[in-house]
Amino acid sequence: MITGPRDLYIPSDSWKEMVRMAAPNPTGMDAGFAKALDEFGRYAATIGGDIGESIQRCRDHLQRFLSAAQEVISAESGENSARLGRPRNFDYGDQVLIFQVFNYKDKDTVSIREDRLATLLTNYDRFHDTMQFMERKVNEGNLGILQNTFLFIHKPLEKAAVTFDKAMVKTSLVYTTVMGEKADPTYVHISGTEPSSEVDSGLICRVLKPGYAFEGREIQEGVVIVAE
């Protein structure tokens, strides 16, 4: 009987990209989330108003995601005799970390503890949602000559997010809390209902806590509101 968190088998190429994007000190021309932190903080201070607040909020969520991701990556790295596989080097900005890689279902994989991965994903999803909200606010606003500056500092952030999203798609992870889809009671707790003009009755209209499953097993229960 499993009494503690399970290990999930993540394709090593996907994990390598996720590790690289979360590095605290990206090198050279490498994309990385950390490149946007300082620039976005300074930029938000010059804009003010709703747009500036949205940019700062995105920066704050990004910082929380990176803190969680770096903590998970640090905890999972290093040689571990209790796990299968051989140690391999993974680039981590200006550092190199070791993860044990082994063959699972004819793929090179790394094993990551499910609760730690859920923590990383939850913080990433919150940041990603906030980033999309920020982008809408900037598009709706009128930044004038400051628009080009925003696009310049936003580019590494967008590139890192695209790389991270592609790495996620290549895993066996499934999002169980998707807006506009039916809530599966196997994985999702329905906290309540509310009117919605965007989705049909009975479908998820708001996500209170993202949920994830891996190969048919729940790794984090989702909590949602459904449309009346």
Image (tube, grey):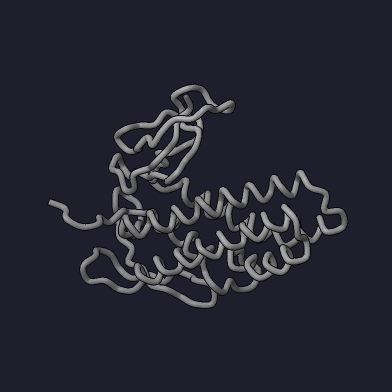
* Picture layout, residue 33 above or below residue 174: below
Quadrant housing residue 25: bottom right
In the rendered structure, the answer to whether residue 51 lies left or right of residue 11 reads: right
In the rendered structure, the answer to whether residue 199 lies left or right of residue 108 reads: right
| Residue lying at the far top of the rendered structure | 201
Residue drawn at the location 39% of the way across and 71% of the way down: 74
Q: Nearer the viewer, residue 3 or 195?
A: 195
Measured as percent of width and height from the top left, residue 140 is found at 76, 44
* Picture layout, residue 108 above or below residue 141: below
Measured as percent of width and height from the top left, residue 31 is found at 61, 63
Quadrant housing residue 196: top right
In the rendered structure, the answer to whether residue 80 lies left or right of residue 190 reads: left
Q: Nearer the viewer, residue 82 or 67?
A: 67
| Residue lying at the far bottom of the rendered structure | 95
Q: Nearer the viewer, residue 127 or 31?
A: 127
* Picture layout, residue 209 above or below residue 87: above
* Picture layout, residue 106 above or below residue 39: above
Q: Nearer the viewer, residue 99 or 59?
A: 59
Residue drawn at the location 81% of the way across and 55% of the way down: 147
Residue drawn at the location 49% of the way across and 30% of the way down: 194
Measured as percent of width and height from the top left, residue 83 is found at 24, 65
| Residue lying at the far left of the rendered structure | 1
Number of numbered discs overlaid on the protein picture: 0
In the rendered structure, the answer to whether residue 104 lies left or right of residue 58 reads: left
Measured as percent of width and height from the top left, residue 180 is found at 50, 30
